[in-house]
Amino acid sequence: LPLCAMDGDHLQGRWLRNCDPAAIRRPERYAYGSPLPRTNGSWDYRLCSRMGYAQRARTREALAWSWVPDQCALRQVDGAEFGAWLAGRRLLFWGDSLSGQAFYSLLFSLGAEVERVADLPPEPAALDAFLDGRTGGPLCSYGGVGDEGGALTAAALRSGGTLVKVLGHAPMVDELRRPLSAPWAWWEPLLRRADIVVANVGHHYRALDGRYARYGAMVRAALA
């Protein structure tokens, strides 16, 4: 089968059980190819297999299934290939906890392609210092995922690209809905300087607009 173009061709398919959950002895190694570093803080729901027996069992059950498209094949994540594709560009994950999960899933999937990673103070100057090589350490020693890494986390890739995570919760919805002429939040310059933005505040926006009728227009206006 050809590789999926990800233009919707991957949405028709089926869930396929690929192994017995009991055979997944080390969920993190099974998912990412290597064990993940020890985390700080109390929010290990980022790594569900560390939250107790019940959550470990749920993680193993989830990992035992794969989505298989009917007409194409999903590309496996390859750190070096992804880094070459991103090249010198900046990929920003902006939003709530769901965006944070997407950021960390990609970060750990890239493995050795990640040269440095750091949790930073929530200000553009801190990201500039990181990009200059003045802060950050190797992925194997990074433990911030357990505390969501704070409001700002950045990762430098060996191929020259940068991953950035701007994390917030309910207040981000109000900040995003402000007119462009009004003072924005500290993260506005980072949003403007990103080459690619993955934006999601749907987790909290649901309380304001349960049908998400105005969600798309709000995000498009902010990214215009």
Image (cartoon, helix red, strand yellow):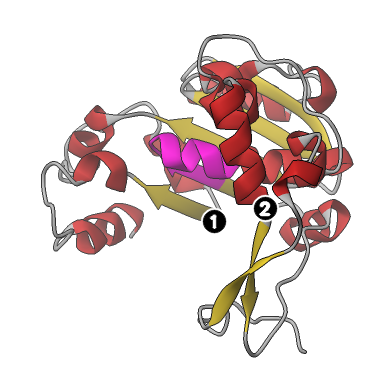
Q: Is residue 185 left or right of residue 39?
A: left
In the picture, the quarter occupied by the C terminus is bottom left
Q: Is residue 26 above or below residue 2?
A: above
Q: Give the percent coordinates (x, y) of residue 74.
A: 70, 73
Of 96 and 198, which appears nearest the observer?
96
Earlier residue among tags 2 and 1: 2
Q: Give the percent coordinates (x, y) of residue 92.
A: 53, 45
Q: Disc number at residue 89?
A: 2
Of 94 and 107, which appears nearest the observer?
107
Q: Residue at x 74, y 63 (%)?
A: 18
Of 17 and 122, which appears nearest the observer?
17
Q: Which residues are magenta?
A: 92-103
Q: Is residue 190 left or right of residue 72?
A: left
Please, which residue is most extreme toward the top here? 41
Tell me the amino acid under the disc marked 2: Arg
> Is residue 48 among what the camera can see?
no
Q: Give the percent coordinates (x, y) of residue 212.
A: 18, 58
Q: Which of the 4 image quarters holds residue 23?
A: top right
In the picture, the quarter occupied by the N terminus is bottom right
Tell me the amino acid under the disc marked 1: Ile
Q: Residue at x 53, y 35 (%)?
A: 165
Q: Is residue 99 left or right of residue 174?
A: right
Of 34 and 198, which appears nearest the observer?
34
Is 96 colored magenta in this rendering? yes
Q: Is residue 22 left or right of residue 194?
A: right
Q: Residue at x 21, y 55 (%)?
A: 218
Q: Disc number at residue 209?
A: none
Q: Residue at x 18, y 36 (%)?
A: 174
The answer to whether marks 2 and 1 mark residues whose Cβ atoms lie closer than 8 Å is yes
Q: Disc number at residue 196?
A: 1
Q: Give the percent coordinates (x, y) of residue 4.
A: 67, 81
